[in-house]
Image (cartoon, grey):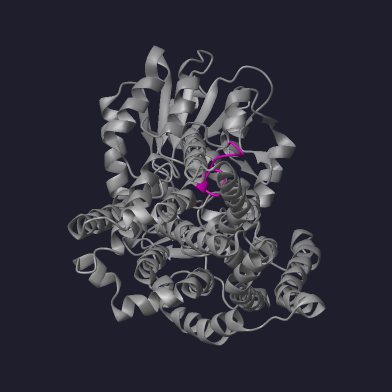
Amino acid sequence: MQGLRALAVLAVVIFHSRLPLPGGFVGVDVFFVISGFVITGMLMREFKEHGRIRFGRFYLRRFKRLTPALALMVATIMAISAFTMSPLGPQQVSGQTAIAAMLFCANFVIANVTGGYFDAPADQNPFLNTWSLSVEEQFYFVFPALLGACWVYARRVGNARFPHTVVRLVIVSSLFIAFWGVSHPGGTLAGFYSPYSRAWEFAVGAAIALNAGRLGRLRKVDAARATLLGAAMVLTSFFVISGTTPFPGPWTLLPVLGTALLITGGTRAEASPVTRALTSRTMVRLGDWSYSIYLWHWPLIVIAMTLWPTTSWAPLAAASVSFIPAALSYHLVEEPLRRRNWGVGPRRKRSIGMVFAAPVALAAVVWTIAANYWEPRYAQGQVASDMTGEVGDDAFYAYLAANFTPCENADLRNHAQPFRRIPRCYQSRSGPVDTVLLGDSHAEHLFVGLAEQAPSRNVAFYIVNGSPIPSDPQFNYVLSAVAQDQTIRTFVVNSHWRKRGTNEAGLRQTMRTLSQGGRQVFMTDDGPNFAISAFGCKYGQTALHIDRQCSNTNEGYRTQNRRIHSALAAVATDVPGVTLMGSAKYFCNGATCSMTNGKTLLYRNAGHLNVDGSRYVMKALVRDNPTFGQALGLSS
């Protein structure tokens, strides 16, 4: 089992290190199945021995296993973030998430204040990885009691299979929620961070534990085959799943069932190559450290990317260094405190309270100072900067809320992912919409400029966290809705192409659908993403930051953009009524790309335009593309 844990954590670390393992994040799903198997087996043994589950002892063991190591990491990273991270957003988000992590509700807070796991703001939250710990503990707040009740009832009525039936119902109902969430994104029950759409993964592990007696009778040759097939499925999932895959959903079956096969065959396939590899001394040692490695690697990567944003190897270096505090935490905190006698009564309560107190207090202090001291000083101009243009997502979405109307199409408005409870779906004014922005957040950030450049048009944006192609179920939902609205005559499509890719066949389908009936469609090739922070650019000369940097080298982006522009141009050429507009030239000149225009900051973070940037780009697009201006009613 430790070798399987090692495989899971290595996949996650490699993914977060920006190495080419697009589905490495599914290592967390492997952990979920292992957890369900191990915990259910432990509960079964306790019930057989004592005739009941002693919940106090169970939750004390969980606390000793998880919380002291978590508290050490949270307190250490909060202290570091106070000196290295921006107080305009990142410090506040870190403080909120840190407190939530200690209370095992980080998944809900992250969904509310950070957004999607693959969205740009997630790269600035050092406690993003704690979402999975919260999901796990939320499952175990309910599942042991459910199992215990099932075993008591089964003993009373003489139906030994009753717990198996209930676990199967958990799997089916949770799977239904996960699959439903793929076609209905934005709901509260389903989603990446939801315990409801993840419960089936733990329950699969539980089902294996409940059937351990039967599975123990597997022939060794069948067990060996199971481990080989399971390993192939898990390893394949690391490469075929990516951040654009609707998840959790049908594709989640691949790593979950693969893990189930590895666990099922592992105890009987001692001689299989997979078992030998997973039981090697190195893998077992890494498995022992896996929890601490998982805790430490991501926070250190975030801090490294904050301090050295233009250094491509910083994430990998930070992930490598994280094995040192992970090993120290395991040997000096995790293991000693797990074996320690925490006493009874008041003494135990004091010990538990002390573990919670330091990280929660430190997080609260950093959060409070950032929100009530630094943020007002920046907002009121008390911190000097010779550059204009707002920083951070809050100002951008506040501008939307203050100046525009939430989408009147209720289905699309409810479909939109919110930002801190603000639906990311707006239109210029009330009434029928005639001009629409489609794509992801890189379409959204063009809205202000488009709406203000075309005052005679009613402009709206409908965006998803996915690719603008029909095979993406989230986008297809939007595409179907706008294709039927005959009041819409003009579409503008933009996306983070370097992240989403340019699926030419899928884009042709989208463009043909949008251009039906003589409607005009305009695409842009998107602007650059930066390996530097907008905050550091604007305030880099203040006491909080060491240096100002507002530009990146253009070499890598120029190569990428050439490929993207070529693919988009091919689509525009093939589909009548579609026009491609270049926007990269407004940011890049010669060897560098800049997030500023003179003394005006154009970006609110490393990848998204602020209000000034939206105006700047859209004004330039209208100026340089007469057909676009005509479509917006700006010229004859």
Percent of width and height locating residue 481: 50, 21
In terms of depth relative to the viewer, which is nearer, 82 or 130?
A: 130
53 or 32, which lies in front? 53
Q: Does residue 189 show up magenta in the picture?
A: yes
Query: Is 607 drawn above or below residue 627 in the view shown?
Result: below
Where is residue 488? Give x, y as percent: 52, 18
Residue 198 seen by the camera: no
From the viewer's side, name the closer residue of 481 and 30.
30
For residue 125, above or below residue 244: below
Indicate the position of residue 632 as horizontal and vertical percent values. Answer: 52, 24
Q: Quadrant of the N terminus?
A: bottom left
Q: Nearer the viewer, residue 579 or 283?
A: 283
Q: Left of 70 or right of it: where is 28? A: left
Magenta stretch, overall SS? loop
Q: Which residues are magenta?
A: 187-199
Q: Taking 160 as reference, is 177 above or below it? A: above
Q: Residue at x 59, y 20 (%)?
A: 433
Q: Quadrant of residue 431?
A: top right
